[in-house]
Image: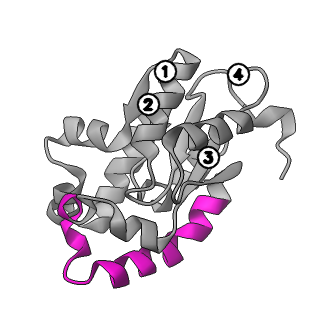
Amino acid sequence: MSHLGGGHVSAQGPVLILVGPPGSGKSTVGRLAAEHLGVPFRDFDHDLEHAHGLPAGELVVRLGRERFQEAERELLTALLPEFTGVLALGGGTPTAPGVPELLAPFHVVFLDVDLEHLLRREGLVSLHPWLMPNPRAHLRELLKARRPVYTEVAAATVPTSGRAPAEVLADVLATLPAATG
């Protein structure tokens, strides 16, 4: 997949955006990447929580899926032009209407993880109570529904299953356009 002009339509905005399901390592790898590149790191779910005063999981319930996705898109629209570091998006953020178009000018990497590794992630289900009562079925559906979107918005896909964060980081950094690394 080739991007004209290295994928950066504008000079402003995040140097790297990570997408992937909950538990794929976006925050861990994002922090390491930001440290390596000498730029700030932001977790979009934390930004949402800060803006609305509720964790993302509760916001979805309170606002409903549609309004929640509008809130995600609004916040992202405001954030993208002014934030120049590494951004980890919420698991569902790329699936919100209008978000793939917002992400298009930026360097997006999809952290791919398989179902078995997700199910072994400690604390995943307690952090994401909507996965109950059947986390395996929920996660399988989630991955099936979202994988095409993640693949579509990302310039590169990096597998994370069973790999150390440092290994994943090296692969992620290798995808960056030469100018930023």
Disc with the residue nearer the chain's start (2 vs 3): 2
Q: Quadrant of the C terminus?
A: top right
User: Would residue 95 appear left or right of 122 to someone viewing this image?
Assistant: right
Helix, strand or loop at mark 3:
strand
Disc 4: which residue: 181
Q: Residues under labels 4 and 3: Cα distance? A: 15 Å
Q: Is residue 106 visible?
A: no
Q: Is 148 contained in the magenta span?
A: yes
**Front residue of this view, candidates 103 and 177:** 177
Disc 3: which residue: 109
Helix, strand or loop at mark 4:
loop
Disc with the residue nearer the chain's start (1 vs 4): 1
Read off the magenta span. 126-151
Disc with the residue nearer the chain's start (4 vs 2): 2
Q: Residues under labels 1 and 4: Cα distance? A: 12 Å
Q: Residue furthest top?
A: 38
Residue at 76% across / 30% down in the picture? Answer: 177
Disc with the residue nearer the chain's start (4 vs 3): 3
Q: Amino acid at mark 1?
A: Glu
